[in-house]
Amino acid sequence: MGYSPRYHLLAVICMLSACAATQEASVREDGPTKKISPRKHREHVMQSAWRGQPYVALLKNFGPPRTVMAYPNMQTERGEIVLYGVRDANSNCIDAFTVAAPKSNHDRVVTDYFCR
C-alpha cells in the first residue's frame, strides 16, 4: 500500500517545522532542571561572563557601542547604559550593558547585562 504524494509533503513540512522550532536551554538552579528560552539563557550566560569585567574588555570584544546613555546612580560617580544594535541570531537579543565607575577608582566596569 503506497502513500499519496500529499502525505509525503505533509510529513516533510512537519519535520521542517519541528527543526525550525525555538530551541530551549536547560538550566539547573538548586532543584530540578527547568527549560528556559534562548533569550533568558543568553542573559544568564552574558551576566555571568561580563559582570565586574573592565569596560575596555567589552570594547575590545564588541567594538564601539551604537548608543551610550547616562543614568543617575547614587553608588557610583557615573553610570551608563551601553547598547549594541546587533541582534544575536539564536536568541534575537540586542545586547545592552550597564557600566559604572566605582567611587573608589575611576576605571569603568560592566555592572550588568540585559537582553533587549
Image: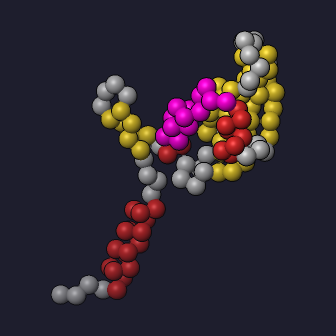
Residue 22 in the image, given as x and y percentages of width and height: 46, 53
Q: Residue at x 39, y 36 (%)?
A: 27
* Magenta-drawn stretch contains 114: no
Give the quadrant of the N terminus.
Answer: bottom left
List x then y, in percent, for residue 37.
47, 43
Residue 69: x %, y % from top left: 81, 32
In the shown orientation, is residue 91 left or right of residue 103? left
Report the magenta residues as a range.
40-54
**Pick the front one: 97 or 102:** 102
* Residue 45 located left or right of residue 105: left
Residue under the image location 76 percent in, 43 percent down: 65
Residue 40 makes an appearance in the image: no
Q: Is residue 5 above or below residue 44?
A: below
Count of numbered tags:
0
Q: Foreground: 29 or 54? A: 54
Residue at the spot 75% in from the left edge and 12% down from the top edge: 103
Please give the name of the residue rendered at 67% of the width and 38% of the height, measured from the top-left corner. Answer: 58
Judge whether 94 appears above or below 50 on screen: below
Quadrant of res 19: bottom left
| Quadrant (top left/top right/bottom left/bottom right) for the C terminus | top right
